[in-house]
Structures are given as C-alpha cells and as structure tokens.
Amino acid sequence: MRTFVPSVLGLVALICMPSAISARVASPTLAALSREADLIVLARVERISVESPDVSIASSRVIEVWKGGQELSGGTVTFTASSSIACDMSTATVGRLSVLFLERDKNQKAIRIAVSGRGQMLINEVDGKSYASLMGVILPKELESLDKLSPREPGKGILAVEDLKGYVVRTLTKRR
C-alpha cells in the first residue's frame, strides 16, 4: 500500500501538469544551424503530397545550393514538411520560396527541416530585393535584423537574403 500511494500521486502529477513534460525546442544560433545542417538551399516548393494524415512531403526546385549536394542545383529536393512534435514549425506551401536548412534523419534516411522547422526561412520580395524571415534562430551581433518593430526580440528577425547567404558562407569557410 505504501508504494501504491506514491505511484498514484506521481501519475496524477504527470496528468495534471502537461506543461512540465511538453517538448520544447531550443533556439539555435545561425552559426550552429549553418554548421549542423546537411544541406542548405534556396528553393521553391513545387508540389506537396500527403503520405498520411500526419505526414506531408514537399518537393522543391533548388535555385541555389549553399551547402552540400551541389548536384542538386537546378534539381529537386524532397523533404518532410509536417510537424513531428508539438512545437515543430515545419510546413510548406506550393509556390513559396525559402532558404532551407535541411538535415537527414539518421534512422529513417528521410530529409527534414532542421531544428523542428526553425531551419526554414521564408523569402519575401520588397522593391525588388529578397528578404528572409527567421523564427526561432538567434542572430549573431554582426547581423542586424531589419525588423524595426522588434529588433532585439530573441529568435526573430528579417535579413536581406544576400546578407544571410554571406554569413552562412563565411561561417562554413571559417570551419575548414
């Protein structure tokens, strides 16, 4: 009876406090995201197929390769574009241009957006210039976010794509 009561209390605590056991994803630095990604590309989503109610697969036309897979330039990359855990931000929309930091799933041999979707940076055009929106990625001090409404909000920012690419290339070159 003595072991039964603590076990029941422990079970009740787990049921009543879901926030204590919910999954959280730490915000990576842009440098760490760049180094740890297996593949970094600028790509446009061409097609999405639904494999199951919980799994969508996106096929994207590769415009530029920033890291790995140089043979993909002008080709297609296919990746999982659906959430795997509660705080996963992975998604895809046909026609959408993005910088994708992708990683290979070691167990399933699939490719997915790095760090639970934080490795997807949507591109918007403003006055003929391309800008990337970052969510959940910590910017280095040398890169200033163009988001003047919340310029120092951790893990959020807007960068010119050319500045983002320059930083990624410099980061990868330093490592060698």
Image (cartoon, grey):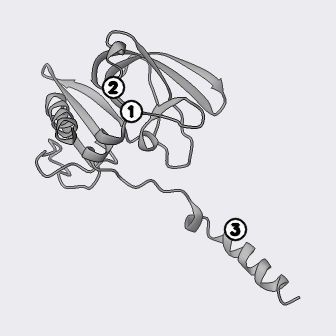
Question: Is label 1 in a helix, a strand or a loop?
Answer: loop
Residues tagged 1 and 2 counted as in contact (Cβ below 8 A): yes
Q: Give the residue furthest to the right.
A: 1
The residue that label 1 is drawn on is: 38
Q: Could you tell which of marks 1 and 2 lies nearer the N-terminus?
A: 1
Residue drawn at x 29%, y 39% as measured from the top left: 34
The residue that label 3 is drawn on is: 15
| Quadrant of image for the N terminus | bottom right
Q: Residues within 10 Å of mark 1 (few under 14, many from 20)?
A: some
Residue drawn at x 17%, y 40% as measured from the top left: 174
Q: Amino acid at mark 2?
A: Gly
Percent coordinates x, y for residue 53 in the rendering: 66, 30
Question: Is label 2 in a helix, a strand or a loop?
Answer: loop
Gap in angstroms between the C-alphas marked 1 and 3: 38 Å
Residue drawn at x 81%, y 85% as measured from the top left: 5
Instruction: Left or right? Give the position of 108 relative to 162.
Output: right
